[in-house]
Image (cartoon, rainbow, N blue to C red):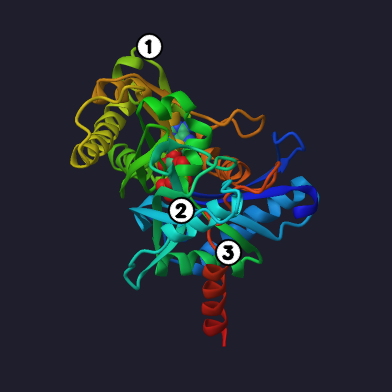
């Protein structure tokens, strides 16, 4: 895949598996050249619970993307859910190696390696290291120290750790679907790539990804990810409320929600009536969108209040200066923005990737993975912080688990 500079982002979500293929141009811009989607049946609340079903979903999504791209896909970067990760702050210090004391990429690699040295419980593994700032001879706030002159190089970094078991299952499914893993990316960081502007991240913003089975809340400030929280609720709850409320099967309720759902009864005042199709011997019925909104509103309100509560627990009691940014499938509900504004007492908007064919918040994670890799890796210009993302030794270990498991 490297020859054409293709990057594949694989988002294994609770409701769908999505793979996005991006081509990186010489100028660093990205073209989205392939998309594959398949309903996901092997996950519950963002976590893989059925390996075989997950493998099938991945295979179907990959096949669809391969048909579109016209070439085989052999590897991908995969997203990892917030509920399975932990964030740890750490510092690394090294002496600048060169005789002229000019800081090089190698010094940066070494200091990032030094920051990785933390005591981890045996069930956790480092998946990413995010440098927040570099400090050269005591001068802090440096974003890129390469080329500067100094003796002592320090880094203030955030280490992202993942649960070994869930990473193992994820890797296993992807490999069994015939793909190698190029690396793992925290879904939140991927989403932020396409959903948040630099100014928003600098000022302070809350991002909420409401998917089918999970809601991930994150806070960015001073340009960096500060905190994440994952809540095991999502759009599936809204669907089951509709199914119960209208006494209809889940698949009908899901279709009804995505086609006619409104999150605020006040936005459904035009008296629109939609037909709930005839099913299993029952007469076709007419339902007012307002009635649908009366079912959706309390559940979405509850989910957003849970998100606000998680933020309070993390110490964020004020409304975020740059507002709230919504992403994930549920943000497509008409009225979701207005409801969010009411609950957070702040401005809100829905973010979507700006590419033809994937202009929907359901693609934010897959497209965001490609952006994240493009901007942290070596696809354009000089090699950048390649140690940040999963190190080879990590993969060696993962690979050896496989050999053990299949032996
Ligand atoms: N147009 C729409 N209106 C309302 N809800 C929608 C719409 N499109 C998708 N959804 C809902 O969004 C949810 C799926 O969102 P998404 O695809 O972001 O989830 P996922 O990434 O598969 O799951 P998760 O992130 O929870 O693991 C489902 O509950 C689906 O019903
Ligand atoms: Mg998702």
Are discs 3 and 1 less than 8 Å apart at CB? Answer: no
Viewer-side residue, 115 vs 145: 145
Closer to viewer: mark 3 or mark 1: 3
Q: Which mark is residue 216?
A: none
- Left/right placement of residue 201 relative to residue 25 reads left
Give how far apart the Cα atoms at labels 3 and 1 are. Answer: 47 Å
Q: Which residue is mark 3?
A: 174
Question: In x, y percent, where is residue 103?
Answer: 56, 47
Q: Which residue is mark 2?
A: 129
Mark 2 or 3, nearer chain start: 2
- Left/right placement of residue 379 relative to residue 347 reads right
Question: In x, y percent, where is residue 187?
Answer: 46, 47
Closer to viewer: mark 2 or mark 3: 2
- Left/right placement of residue 391 relative to residue 317 reads right
Viewer-side residue, 208 vs 221: 221
Question: In x, y percent, where is residue 310?
Answer: 23, 41
Q: Residues within 10 Å of mark 3 (few under 14, many from 20)?
A: many
Viewer-side residue, 306 vs 85: 85
Mark 2 or 1, nearer chain start: 2
Image quadrant where one finds the C terminus: bottom right
In the image, what residue occupies the spot 29% across and 20% down? 346
Are discs 2 and 3 less than 8 Å apart at CB? Answer: no
Q: Residues within 10 Å of mark 2 (few under 14, many from 20)?
A: many
Question: In x, y percent, where is residue 288?
Answer: 35, 22
Give how far apart the Cα atoms at labels 2 and 1 are. Answer: 51 Å
Q: Is residue 163 above or below residue 196?
A: below
Give how far apart the Cα atoms at labels 2 and 3 are. Answer: 23 Å
The reply to whether residue 256 is visible in this rendering is no
Q: Which residue is mark 1?
A: 270
The reply to whether residue 265 is visible in this rendering is yes
- Left/right placement of residue 174 relative to residue 232 reads right
For mark 2, give the secondary structure.
Answer: strand
């Amino acid at each position: 895949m490297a020859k054409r500079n293709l990057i594949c982002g694989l988002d294994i979500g609770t409701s769908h598996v999505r793979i996005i293929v991006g081509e990186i141009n010489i100028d660093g811009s990205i073209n989205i050249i392939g998309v594959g989607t398949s309903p996901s049946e092997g996950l519950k609340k963002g976590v893989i619970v059925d390996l075989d079903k997950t493998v099938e979903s991945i295979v179907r999504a990959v096949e669809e993307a391969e048909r579109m791209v016209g070439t085989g896909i052999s590897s991908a970067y995969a997203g990892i859910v917030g509920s399975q990760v932990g964030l740890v702050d750490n510092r690394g210090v090294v002496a600048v190696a060169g005789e002229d004391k000019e800081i090089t990429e190698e010094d940066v690699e070494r200091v990032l390696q030094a920051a990785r040295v933390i005591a981890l419980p045996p069930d956790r593994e480092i998946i990413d290291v995010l440098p927040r700032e570099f400090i050269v001879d005591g001068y802090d706030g440096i974003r890129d120290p390469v080329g500067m002159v100094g003796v002592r190089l320090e880094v203030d970094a955030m280490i992202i750790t993942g649960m070994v078991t869930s990473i193992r299952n994820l890797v296993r499914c992807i490999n069994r679907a015939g793909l190698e893993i190029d690396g793992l990316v925290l879904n939140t960081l991927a989403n932020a790539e396409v959903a948040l502007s630099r100014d928003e991240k600098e000022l302070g913003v809350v991002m909420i990804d409401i998917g089918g089975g999970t809601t991930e809340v994150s806070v960015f400030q001073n340009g960096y990810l500060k905190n994440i929280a994952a809540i095991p609720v999502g759009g599936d709850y809204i669907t089951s409320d509709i199914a119960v409320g209208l006494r209809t099967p889940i698949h009908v309720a899901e279709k009804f929600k995505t086609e006619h759902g409104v999150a605020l009864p006040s936005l459904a005042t035009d008296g629109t009536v939609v037909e709930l199709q005839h099913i299993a011997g029952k007469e076709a019925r007419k339902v007012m969108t307002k009635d649908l909104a009366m079912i959706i509103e309390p559940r979405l309100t509850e989910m957003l209040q849970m998100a606000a509560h998680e933020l309070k627990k993390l110490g964020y009691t004020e409304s975020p200066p740059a507002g709230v940014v919504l992403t994930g499938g549920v943000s497509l509900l008409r009225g979701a923005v207005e409801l969010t504004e009411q609950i957070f007492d702040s401005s809100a908007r829905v973010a979507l990737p700006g590419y033809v064919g994937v202009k929907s918040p359901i693609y934010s994670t897959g497209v965001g993975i490609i952006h994240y890799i493009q901007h942290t890796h070596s696809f354009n210009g000089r090699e950048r912080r390649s140690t940040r993302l999963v190190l080879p030794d990590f993969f060696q270990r993962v690979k050896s688990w496989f050999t053990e498991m299949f032996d």
